[in-house]
Image: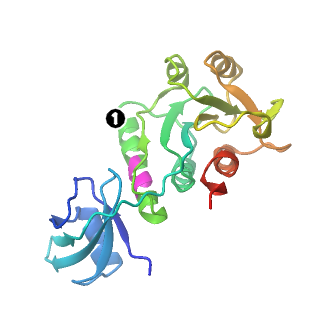
Amino acid sequence: MNLPRFYCREALSPGAHVDLPEPVARHAVRVLRLPPGALMVLFDGRGGEYPARIQRIERDRVVAELAEWHDVERESSLAVTLVQALQSGDKMDFTIQKAVELGVRHIVPVDSRRSVLRLAGERAGKRVAHWQGVVASACEQCGRNQVPLVAPLEKLENWLARPAEGGLRLMLAPDAEQTLATIAPAKNVQLLIGAEGGLDPQEVIAAQQAGFQAVRLGPRVLRTETAGLAALAALQALWGDFREG
């Protein structure tokens, strides 16, 4: 039986009695209609998970009792950072959710020249916080106990100007000569994906100067919401945990 899983920001410990965060408590009781005594799994993003049981339900509180910590991880051995140019509508939510399911380690939203969506200031901060919530929900669903971080939004050109932290840097381009099959495997990858109109030519040059190699995924031009996810799946199949037993 698959037990419901919930993310709690506060550090958890074996045997503790914890008040479930308000959104978690509301979902557990009002949506899933879990009664006292119901079993669940809680995790705090620091690794591992805790079997738990609802001890009591009060008007504005749901208290859970934690059992022993279980050293359970479902992280890929392939560490991928997705550098995703802003997408319009709800495409960013979809891309982030599915990227987490596909095992991405970090998410860096960037404002590129061809991004239709424009965010700045407080609005940008709220959207990043929303995306972090999307990440947590995706972890609850797919079984991950370590929660990927969504970096603060910044302009792509500013992010590219920073010193590289090491690892293989790839960007998708439909006219690239290289494919993933022609590149030596790596365990640390930064994957750059453009917005609806792709990357601006000057951004492509800046990315190349920053060490990014252009690669293509087959003969077709992929939409921005397809490209990153297809590349992540391909990377996991070639170098990551899709090939592990």
* Residue 47 highlighted magenta (yes or no): no
Identify which residue is drawn at 19% across, 72% down: 65
Chain part drawn in magenta: 132-136
Instruction: Give 182 or 36, whichever is nearer the viewer.
Output: 182
Left or right position of 92 against 33: right
Please, is residue 192 above or below residue 94 in the view? above
Q: Which residue position is annotated with label 1? A: 122
Q: Is residue 92 visible?
A: yes
* Residue 134 highlighted magenta (yes or no): yes
Residue 22 location in percent, x, y?
23, 63
Colouring: rainbow
The quarter in which the C terminus is drawn is bottom right
Q: Is residue 85 visible?
A: no
Residue 112 falls in image quadrant: top right
Residue 164 location in percent, x, y?
53, 21
Residue 43 falls in image quadrant: bottom left
Prevailing SS of the magenta stretch: helix
Identify which residue is drawn at 30% across, 81% down: 34
Q: Amino acid at mark 1?
A: Glu
Instruction: Give 208 or 85, whichever is nearer the viewer.
Output: 208
Q: What element does badge 1 sit on? A: helix
The quarter in which the N terminus is drawn is bottom left
Identify which residue is drawn at 20% across, 59% down: 13
Identify which residue is drawn at 50% across, 19% down: 158
Left or right position of 136 against 68: right
How packed mark 1 is, by other alpha carbons closer than 10 Å (few <14, some 14-19, many 20 or more), is few
